[in-house]
Amino acid sequence: MIRTALPAEAGAVADLHLRARSTYYPDGVPEDGTDWSAAWRSAIERPDGQVLCAVEHGRIVGIASFRTPEGAPSGTVKLFQFHVAPDHWRSGIGTALHAACVEQWRADGRRTAVLDVHVGNERAQAFYARRGWVPDPENPPAEGDHHLFLRYAVTGE
């Protein structure tokens, strides 16, 4: 089942986020002092955004966070976070969660979605490419940046 995340689930969402991110950081997720539970609670409670979660057997196994980024053209949405629990990879959860995002973006009248993905996260890059995400021509990678910027035509799927 895919539904909107609840504020009380911020800790579980943060735990999944950190487990998924640690798979593509060779030395683990960088410690920068972020209180991830508080950050996720804020994202869940934002009136201008949405956090979807995939739930299986009462456990959150996938999350997606999106909203309109500051200064973005009308009709644009940014996918800020998209994670599936590593023990659920290749089970269809990511595909279903992505489809739910696209469905919501269409319902909201979005035309374009953007995201950035870590250059070392080749698994995620392949996932997005299979769904039609392409390099964002308006945001080419800067030298030394550790993110790739991708774009998706919401109305084109």
Image: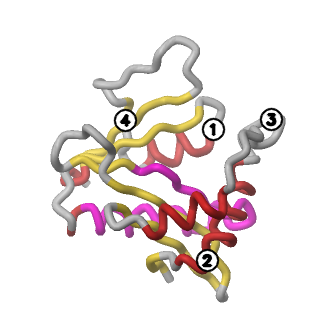
Residue at mark 2:
9
Residue segment shown in magenta: 79-105
Q: Colour scheme in the image?
A: secondary structure
User: Where, quadrant-wise, is the C terminus in this rendering?
Assistant: bottom left
Three-letter amino acid code at the position of disc 1: Asn
Q: Is residue 130 above or below residue 135?
A: below
Please state which of the two labelled residues, at mark 1 or mark 2, is closer to the viewer: 2
**Residue 26 has which mark?**
3
User: How many residues crowd around disc 2 within 10 Å: few (fewer than 14), some, or many (20 or more)?
Assistant: some
| Residue count near mark 1 (Cα–Cα under 10 Å), binned few <14, some 14–19, many ≥20 | some
Of the image marks 1 and 2, the number of the one nearer the N terminus: 2
Is residue 94 highlighted in magenta?
A: yes
Magenta span contains residue 35: no
- Residue 118 place in picture, x, y as percent: 59, 35
Instruction: Tell whether 57 sits left or right of 48.
Output: right
Residue 146, can we see it? yes
Q: Are marks 4 and 2 in contact (CB under 8 Å)?
A: no
For residue 105, above or below residue 78: below
Does 8 sit left or right of 77 as displayed? right
Q: Residue at x 40, y 36 (%)?
A: 150
SS for callout 1:
loop
Sequence order check, earlier mark of 2 and 3: 2
Residue at image coords 61%, 37%: 122
Q: Is residue 153 above or below residue 16?
A: above
In this rendering, which labeled residue sits more in front, label 4 or label 2? 2
Label 3 vs label 4, nearer the camera = 3
Q: Which residue is mark 1?
A: 121
